[in-house]
Image (cartoon, rainbow, N blue to C red):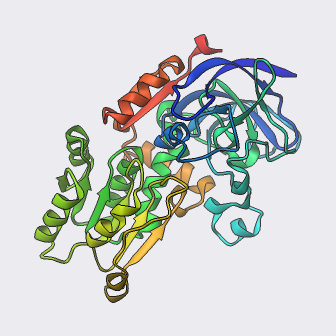
């Protein structure tokens, strides 16, 4: 039996999100139905609109950063129960495949299905339009709807005292950014760190750098308000672009440059890679977290300097960690006052305001906008 609800869909590239009636199927074996309470508005969903992240087709139900309450579980689900508060892991993490067993749970083999749109459990579509067309949910989630049915490997139980509007942030942005700093970059006390792009992911990386004991933290963003926010979150120096950052970092470090650089811009451009490496010290690491257009193949990079300066160019997804461990841990740090999530939520929106929210993101008015569902949405 299908449940009627609503969701934010796109039917083509470069079109606004359309709020319309959808139908969600009941959970089958190993699946969980969730009443959504909050969804972060991550830049990756805008990459669906631009075509940078191509899904298997249209229509697409957006949203991959969410928190809610379990309302129903299918057979075989033992990790959560009805009434539990949960965050969705945008990459499923089964814990059993060879990749998970090797310790790389953020690269779970189930991730191969992320953009296909069919459920992990039985290969069918769980979401349909009102007239019965299959809908592809972003990363098999679709948090831009008040309800969802997902595989148990994407569901992480959390402390019920955590407000949903901050809990949702660790479903993608904060966990990705924080892990980019503490795991992928492996920042050590006293190291100098440069972070390019201060949105939800960049601010997570900045807080990771602070907690890891970085000495100088250089935050680079073209938006003045975001640079001001970065200083409040612990950055020591801010710059509007890569060239002023290059000069500033060289001055502060006496030419040594940043031991670790983290790229969390809204969109990754291959032409910028060499500039990021030029901001990185010899023997240093440049972590690439930002998403590029999947057709992007050209990179500007001085290969001789890569070799002679022994630099490392490191890709990362979801912070390089274990979502089922990292998500509860980061929320426990929030509760202990060691992670500032409250000030990362710049504005809250209704689902019907989603296009306004993304306009605010693109114009640099938000660290993170959050859609907050209420009884009026049910």
Measured along the vertical axis of the image, is residue 125 above or below residue 154? above
Task: Check the image and report above or below for 105 versus 42.
Answer: below
The answer to whether one can see residue 125 in this image is: yes
Q: Is residue 182 left or right of residue 98?
A: left
Q: Is residue 190 visible?
A: no
What is the quadrant of residue 4 in the picture? top right
| Image quadrant where residue 237 sits | bottom left
Relative depth, front residue between 367 and 43: 43
Instruction: Classify residue 278 by image quadrant.
Output: bottom left
The total number of labels drawn is 0
Please report the residue visible at 42 percent of the width from the left and 27 percent of the height from the top.
357
| Residue 86 pos. (x, y %) | 63, 38
Q: Residue at x 56, y 16 (%)?
A: 374
Q: Nearer the viewer, residue 40 or 137?
A: 137
Coordinates of residue 175 in the picture (x, y in percent)? 49, 51
Please state the horizontal and vertical placement of residue 320, each as a whole percent of the image. Answer: 53, 63
The foreground one among 365 and 205 is 365
Outermost residue on the bottom side: it is 308
């Amino acid at each position: 039996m299908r449940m009627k609800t609503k969701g934010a869909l796109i039917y083509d590239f470069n079109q606004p999100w359309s709020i319309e009636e959808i139908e969600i199927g009941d959970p089958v074996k190993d699946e969980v139905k969730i009443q959504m309470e909050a969804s972060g508005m991550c830049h990756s969903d805008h990459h669906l609109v631009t075509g940078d992240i191509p899904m298997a087709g249209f229509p697409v139900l957006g949203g991959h950063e969410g928190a809610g309450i379990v309302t129903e579980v299918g057979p075989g689900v033992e990790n959560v129960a009805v009434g539990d508060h949960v965050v969705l892991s945008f990459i499923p993490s089964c814990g059993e495949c060879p990749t998970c067993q090797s310790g790389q749970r953020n690269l779970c083999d189930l991730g191969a299905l992320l953009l296909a749109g069919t459920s992990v459990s039985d290969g069918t579509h769980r979401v349909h339009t009102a007239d019965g067309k299959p809908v592809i949910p972003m990363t098999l989630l679709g948090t831009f709807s008040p309800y969802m049915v997902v595989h148990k490997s994407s569901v992480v139980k959390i402390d019920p005292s955590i407000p949903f509007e901050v809990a949702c942030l660790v479903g993608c942005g904060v966990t990705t950014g924080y892990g980019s700093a503490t795991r992928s970059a492996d920042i050590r006390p006293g190291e100098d760190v440069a972070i390019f792009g201060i949105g939800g992911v960049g601010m997570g990386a900045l807080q990771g750098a602070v907690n890891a004991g970085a000495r100088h933290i250089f935050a680079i963003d073209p938006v003045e308000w975001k640079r001001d926010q970065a200083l409040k979150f612990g950055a020591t120096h801010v710059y509007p672009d890569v060239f002023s950052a290059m000069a500033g970092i060289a001055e502060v470090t006496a030419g040594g440059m940043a031991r670790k650089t983290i790229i969390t811009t809204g969109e990754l451009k291959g032409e910028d890679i060499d500039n990021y490496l030029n901001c990185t010290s010899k023997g240093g690491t440049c972590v690439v977290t930002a998403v590029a257009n999947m057709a992007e193949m050209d990179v500007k990079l001085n290969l001789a300097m890569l070799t002679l300066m022994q630099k490392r160019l490191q890709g990362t997804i979801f912070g390089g960690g274990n979502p089922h461990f990292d998500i509860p841990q980061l929320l426990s740090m929030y509760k202990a006052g060691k992670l500032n999530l409250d000030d990362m939520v710049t504005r809250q929106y209704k689902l019907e305001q989603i296009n306004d929210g993304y306009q605010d993101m693109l114009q640099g008015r938000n660290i993170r906008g959050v859609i907050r569902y209420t009884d009026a949405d049910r």
